[in-house]
Image: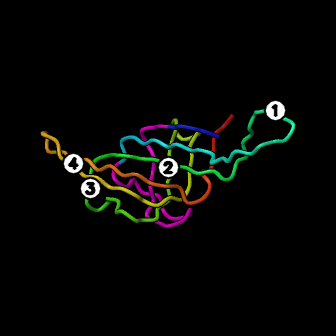
Amino acid sequence: MADSLSGKTGNISTASTQGGTLAVIADMENWNIDSSANTEDKIVFGSGMWTDKDVINYGWTGSADGYFVAANSVVIGSKIWGKFLIDASTNYRYGNCVVTKVGIATAANGMIKQSFEFGGKGELFNNAIS
């Protein structure tokens, strides 16, 4: 289950769980989510020299950036709920996460950009329409 997704719109809620009012926090300009499966090797007797893999657990991490708005900024350590739109509004991923890194930078045009990274807290849910 290695999966890498990206998009340019989404909503982040400062509510710590799903169900909070979604607001556009950090005026998200783009985002990226990587999900993975943590595995361990196992040796199956009678299989020759081949090893096998067992999935231990799944995880996901991501990052996002956008324009800084003081009232809508994200703070390191915050537990947030995110809805990450892949297209229009029919295909998206959503889940709880914790902010692990925050950066702020200014450009020559005076626009302040904020970037942040997050780690998943539990499952990354899929609402893709097939």
Q: Position of residue 115 (x, y in %)?
A: 32, 49
Closer to the chain start, of discs 3 and 1, is 1
Q: In the rendered image of this protein, does residue 25 appear above or below residue 66? A: below
Query: Residue 7 magenta-drawn?
Result: yes
Q: Secondary structure at mark 2?
A: strand
Sequence-first tag of 3 and 2 = 2
Give, as a three-letter code, the residue at label 3.
Answer: Val
Front-lying residue, 11 or 42: 42
Q: Which mark is residue 69?
A: 3
Q: Magenta stretch?
A: 6-27
Check residue 115 in the rendering and tell me which mark sits there, or answer none: none
Q: CA gap, disc 4 to disc 2?
A: 22 Å
Which label was assigned to residue 105? 4
- Mark 3 crowdedness (10 Å alpha carbons): few <14, some 14-19, many ≥20: some
Which amino acid type corresponds to the residue marked 4 in the rendered image? Ala
- Measured along the vertical axis of the image, is residue 13 above or below residue 49? below
Residue farthest to the right, as pictured: 46
CA gap, disc 4 and disc 3: 12 Å
Q: Residues within 10 Å of mark 1 (few under 14, many from 20)?
A: few
Q: Which residue is mark 2?
A: 61
Q: Earlier in the sequence, mark 1 or mark 2?
A: 1
Q: Secondary structure at mark 4?
A: strand
Please tell me the numbered disc located at residue 48: 1
- Image location (x, y in percent) of residue 16: 50, 67
